Image (cartoon, rainbow, N blue to C red):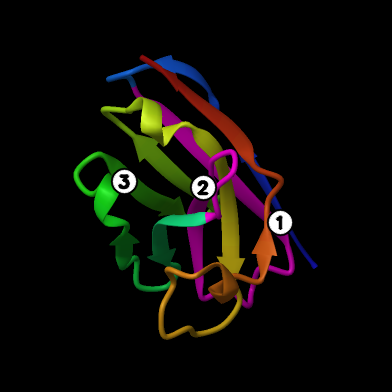
Amino acid sequence: QVQLVESGGGLVQAGGSLTLSCAASGRTFNRYAMGWFRQAPGKEREFVAAINWSTGSTYYADFVKGRFTISRDNAKNTVFLQMNSLKPEDTAVYYCGLSARYRITLTRVTAFDQWGQGTQVTVSS
């Protein structure tokens, strides 16, 4: 069993920055990738970014390219999401996910096997 714990959410003004962290514990040896999704009220969970755990290759949704950066710390079993130039439309609950095996695409919710509890990010205008 894998446990994912997110942290780092909060309230920030538009144009500000936040860094989210997701610490993985438990049976993490079967790990192909980790990623971040978000879900705003009344909307479906959507892909934000993902990282291949072994190669470090990264993938981003178009709406965050140039603003968000996903990274990992292998030793700490932690994935980060650095968010800059935040906009009110970035307001959502951000979820960390872990994909245990190879997937053709990492942009779908169904590509991930485990999820954290989520952390709220609120961007005020």
Quarter-of-image position of residue 16: top left
Counting residues from the N terminus, which is met first, the one under dot 1 or under dot 3? 1
Q: SS class of the residue under badge 1?
A: strand
Determine the CA span between mark 1 and mark 3: 22 Å
Q: Amino acid at mark 2?
A: Arg
Quarter-of-image position of residue 31: bottom right
Mark closer to the observer (1, 3) = 3
Residue position marked by numbered label 1 in the rendering: 25
Q: Which mark is residue 38?
A: 2
Q: Position of residue 101 (x, y in %)?
A: 56, 83
CB-based contact (under 8 Å), mark 1 and mark 3: no
Residue depicted at 50% across the width and 24% down the height: 122
Residue 20 within the magenta-colored segment of the rendering: yes
Mark closer to the observer (2, 1) = 2
CB-based contact (under 8 Å), mark 3 and mark 2: no
Residue depicted at 42% across the width and 73% down the height: 54
Q: SS class of the residue under badge 3?
A: strand
Q: Amino acid at mark 1?
A: Ser
For the C terminus, the image quarter is top left
Q: Position of residue 49 (x, y in %)?
A: 39, 56
Counting residues from the N terminus, which is met first, the one under dot 2 or under dot 1? 1
On screen, residue 66 versus residue 4, left or right, reads left
Determine the CA span between mark 2 and mark 1: 21 Å
Q: Crowding near pointer 2: few (<14 within 10 Å), some, many (20+)?
A: many
Residue position marked by numbered label 3 in the rendering: 69
Q: SS class of the residue under badge 2?
A: strand
Q: Amino acid at mark 3?
A: Thr
Specify start and end residues of the magenta stretch as a single range. Answer: 17-45
Q: Position of residue 24 (x, y in %)?
A: 65, 54
Q: Position of residue 121 (x, y in %)?
A: 52, 29
Residue depicted at 37% across the width and 37% down the height: 82
